[in-house]
Amino acid sequence: MTPPRIPVAREGYPFIFFSAFVTLVTAILGLNIPTWLCLGVTTFVLAFFRDPERMTPASNDALISPADGKIIIIEEQFDEKYLQQQVLKVSIFMNVFNVHVNRIPCNGTIKKIIYAPGKFYSADSAKGALMNENCGGVLTTESGKQLVFVQVAGLIARRIVNWLEPGDVVRRGERFGLIRFGSRVDLYLPPDSEISVTIGQKVTAGVTEIAQIH
C-alpha cells in the first residue's frame, strides 16, 4: 500500500520547521503577541508551500497551465534567447497566495535548461521580465514542435527551483519545480497556436487549458 503523500513541497520544510520552532520558543517564554505573530507567519509559510494533487485533463492536444495565477500577457514577439524565432508569449503572474509548484505543460523531451542570474524587480513589470533571475526549459513535443516555459523570480522571490535536466522525457501535469515567494512563468509557443485564455483570467497549474498546438 502506497503511503499517503504530504501535500507540501519538500523545499518548504526548512522554512516551515524554522518558523514553527520560533513560534514554539516564543510560546514557552510566554510572549503572547510575538507567539501569535509567529503563528501567523508559520501558517502563511505552510500555505505558500502547499502542493495539492491535480486532475490533469485527458486531451493530449491541449497545452495546460504550468502555474497557478493570472494571465497578464498574450502577445506575439520574436524570441531571441531560446528559439530564435517568432513566438506567442503567454505570461502567468503568481502572487504570494497562489500555489507555487510548477507543472509540465505538455508531453515531450527537455532539450535545454537555461539559467540566468539577475535582479529581483516586481515579476509583473516590464523591467522584471527583462532583468530578473530566470530559468527556461526548452521542450520538444511528441509531434516535433518546440516551446519554452520560463520561471521568472519576483520582487520577493529569491530562489528558483528547477528539477529538470536535458534529455528528461516529461509528461503533462508532472511537477518540475517552484519559485519561492511570488513570481511568474512565461510560455513561448509556436505562432500558430490557438490560445484558449484571455488577459486577466485566473488559471490553475496542471488543469487549465492554455492553448492548442497544431
Image (tube, rainbow, N blue to C red):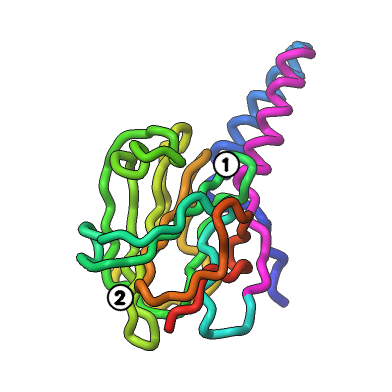
- Residue at the spot 36% in from the left edge and 64% down from the top edge: 188
Looking at the rendered structure, which numbered label has been put on residue 113? Answer: none
Is label 1 or label 2 in front? 1
Residue 167's disc is 2
| Number of on-image labels | 2
51 part of magenta stretch: yes
Q: Amino acid at mark 1?
A: Asn
Work out whether 152 lies above or below 143.
above
Q: Of the residues shown, which amino acid type is indicated by label 2?
A: Gly
Residue drawn at (67%, 32%), measured in percent from left and top?
42
Residue 3 horizontal/vertical position (percent): 70, 68
Left/right placement of residue 112 relative to residue 211 reads: left
The foreground one among 130 and 30 is 130
Quickly name the residue at label 1.
95
| Quarter occupied by the C terminus | bottom left
Residue at image x 61%, y 37%? Answer: 17
Q: Position of residue 36 (x, y in %)?
A: 76, 21
Q: Secondary structure at mark 1?
A: loop
For residue 159, say whether it is visible.
yes
Q: Is residue 116 above or below residue 205?
A: above
Q: Which residues are magenta?
A: 32-56
Q: Earlier in the sequence, mark 1 or mark 2?
A: 1
